[in-house]
Amino acid sequence: MAFERAASVADLVEGKGKQVTLQGRKIAVFLCDGKFYAIDDTCPHRGAPLSEGECRMGQVMCPWHAARFDLATGKALCPPAKSDVRSYPVQVNEQQVYVDVG
Ligand code: FES
């Protein structure tokens, strides 16, 4: 378990995600309502990149078929997604965003 640098704060735009690769995994990092989040970047429905979805109120909407996920927990909130995604701890230090992918 260790936090790794994922992005600069300046790389992230409110309401949007950014794909990063950490330990060979595609991770979606979001800035949503002023908070940073990290979840797996692959929608469990058909594999869309969740980093391309819009986020607000702590949720991201899949860009392909509009399933929504809770950014803090990764929980799938509505169909067509039937399973959750993993969420990861995030820390911000000196304008850098760190994610612990375990
Ligand atoms: S690929 Fe995400 S809802 Fe279909």
Image (cartoon, rainbow, N blue to C red):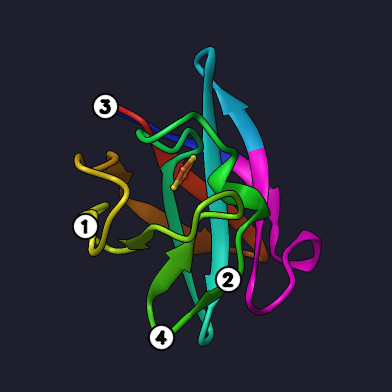
Q: Position of residue 15 (x, y in %)?
A: 63, 77
Q: Residue at x 61, y 49 (%)?
A: 51
Per the model, the C-alpha gap separating discs 3 and 1 is 18 Å
Q: Amino acid at mark 3?
A: Met
Q: Is residue 43 left or right of residue 54?
A: left
Q: Position of residue 50 (x, y in %)?
A: 54, 47
On-image quarter of the N terminus: top left
Q: Is mark 1 within 8 Å of ligand 1?
A: no
Q: Which mark is residue 42?
A: none
Judging by the rendered image, the residue that carries numbered circle 3 is 1
Nearest the viewer among 92 and 61 is 61
Q: Amino acid at mark 1?
A: Thr
Is label 2 in a helix, a strand or a loop?
strand
**Earlier-in-chain disc, 4 versus 1:** 4
Badge 4, how many Cα within 10 Å: few under 14, some, many 20+?
Answer: few
Q: Which residues are magenta?
A: 6-19
Per the model, the C-alpha gap separating discs 4 and 2 is 11 Å
Judging by the rendered image, the residue that carries numbered circle 1 is 73
Q: Residue at x 41, y 86 (%)?
A: 57
- Labels 3, 4: front one: 4
Judging by the rendered image, the residue that carries numbered circle 2 is 31
Do labels 4 and 1 touch, CB within 8 Å?
A: no
When the figure is inspected, residue 25 is found, relative to residue 28, above or below; the finding is above
Q: Position of residue 55 (x, y in %)?
A: 53, 73
Judging by the rendered image, the residue that carries numbered circle 4 is 57
